[in-house]
Image (spheres, rainbow, N blue to C red):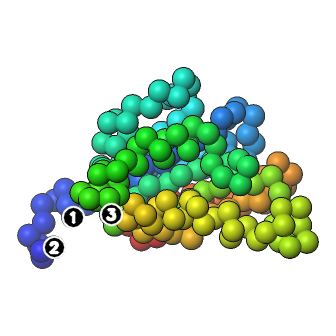
Amino acid sequence: MLASALSPWHRTRRFMVELIYAHPYPTRSRANRLLLDAVRHVPGVHVRMLYQLYPEFAIDVEAEQRRLEAADAIVWQHPLYWYSVPPLLKLWFDKVLALGWAYGQGGTALHGKRCQWVVTTGGDPPSYGAQGIHNHPFATFVAPVEQTARFCGMRWQPPFVLHGAQRVSDELLQGAAARYRELLIALAAGHA
């Protein structure tokens, strides 16, 4: 379709980014709170705070699926919990990314959408390695989240990781927040 044949809405439309924020204790989080504050008002970014929306873990699957269908890109932001996602986000994956909707026969609702993983860790980079306390490189823990996105036909983007979130200096945290903001501006514009 030629650009001249597009409606004004199509020519000016920004990508919509659905940011799924899953922090069980958001008021206690210095790093995730600052990262979220840096992107909360980026045009085209819509934030869904799972623990605020579903404190009893009763996820409205249809509402979540409608939001994802309308989005061009999906961001999962959370702290790393036992080498994985927090419990409500895991339940969200189980319920929302359903067979026949997100994967399997007829499950193409998310195909082609960009997926950005934004994660904070308590450990610093050296703790992820053969000699570190976690005994494995951080990439080992990326694989399950990446495969979830890929299995649903999404276009996986390189993860945005902030290590040592509890101890990182204010200066480094501000720099990470600025980089995250730039990343989501690009993602919302369809350029990431």
What residue is pinned by disc 3?
111
Question: Which quadrant would the N terminus be assigned to in this image?
Answer: bottom left
Distance from Cα at disc 1 to Cα at disc 3: 22 Å
Residue 159 or residue 5, whichever sits in front: 159
State left or right for residue 58 relative to residue 80: left
Instruction: State the mark number for residue 11.
Output: 1
| Residue 174 seen | no
Residue 51, horizontal then vertical, whole percent: 57, 32
Question: Given the image, on which type of amino acid does mark 3 rest?
Answer: His
Q: Residues within 10 Å of mark 3 (few under 14, many from 20)?
A: some
Q: Residues within 10 Å of mark 1 (few under 14, many from 20)?
A: few
In the rendered structure, which disc, 2 or 3, sits on the residue that comes first in sequence? 2
Distance from Cα at disc 2 to Cα at disc 3: 24 Å
Residue 150, horizontal then vertical, whole percent: 45, 66
Q: Quadrant of residue 187?
A: bottom left
Q: Give the residue at x 37% y 36%.
A: 61
Residue 42 or residue 30, whichever sits in front: 30
Residue 163 or residue 59, whichever sits in front: 59
Question: Given the image, on which type of amino acid does mark 2 rest?
Answer: Ala
Q: Give the residue at x 80% y 52%.
A: 122
Q: Residues within 10 Å of mark 2 (few under 14, many from 20)?
A: few
Q: Give the residue at x 83% y 57%.
A: 123
Q: Is residue 68 above or below residue 150?
A: above
Q: Are marks 2 and 1 in contact (CB under 8 Å)?
A: yes
Q: Give the residue at x 60% y 57%.
A: 118
Q: Secondary structure at mark 1?
A: helix
In the rendered structure, which disc, 1 or 3, sits on the residue that comes first in sequence? 1
What residue is pinned by disc 2?
3
